[in-house]
Amino acid sequence: MFLFYLLHILTVIKMRNNTKMLFILILLGLSTPVFAATTTSMAAAIALGLCGFKTLVYGVLPTLALIMFLFAGLAYAAGQAFGAEMRAKAQGWAMSLLVGGIIGIFLAVLAPILVTIFVSMGLPSGSAC
């Protein structure tokens, strides 16, 4: 935040562009070690959060997708007992549930792979979940 105030002051002060650029580079050079120390702990916290998300995806998403498939079949079957208008609505609901279940299965397969890639990119030790 302090750096942004300094950059704003630099835009207001009448200096040559070369002097402004040199001052900005000096400020960034001095602030880099502070950001480097907090970045490592932040990367570890993000990696831990992503590992928790991966566990949640493994446990919850396939179950929800299966339930959506079940409800899609029930909605389609129940819609066949009614008239044309209600049958069309039930088929629309069934298709929506079916697509939601397919997307859930797709995410359940794809999300852990992506989380593993992101965790290995963020941590220098390469420790995975």
Image (cartoon, rainbow, N blue to C red):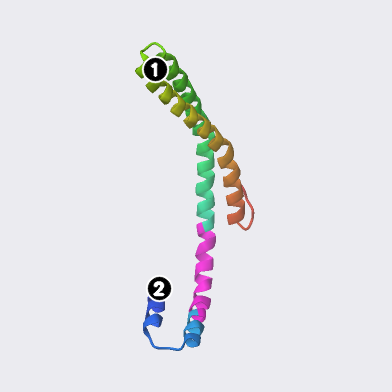
Query: Is residue 98 at all visible to an observer of this figure?
Result: yes
Q: Report the span colored magenta.
A: 25-42
Which quarter of the rendering shows the N terminus?
A: bottom left
Image height of 8 relative to 14, above or below:
above
Viewer-proximal residue, 35 or 97?
97
Q: For the point 50% across and 42% down, which residue is it?
A: 53
Q: Which mark is residue 105?
A: none
Amino acid type, residue under disc 2 in the picture: Phe
Q: Is residue 97 magenta?
A: no
Q: Residues within 10 Å of mark 2 (few under 14, many from 20)?
A: few
> Dot 2 corresponds to which residue?
4
Where is residue 15? Give x, y as percent: 43, 88
Between residue 73 and residue 64, name the one nearer to us.
73
The residue at 37%/16% (across/down) is 84
Considering every residue shown, the one lying at the far right of the view is 126
26 up-or-down from 67: above or below: below
In this rendering, the answer to whether 101 lies above or below 15 is above
Find disc 1 in the rendering and name its residue: 87
* Mark 1 residue type: Arg
Give me the C-alpha separation between circle 2 and circle 1. Answer: 60 Å
Q: Is residue 129 visible?
A: no
The percent coordinates of residue 92 (x first, y second) are 42, 25
Q: Per the image, is 36 magenta?
A: yes
For disc 1, the neighbor class at 10 Å (few under 14, some 14 to 19, many from 20) is: some
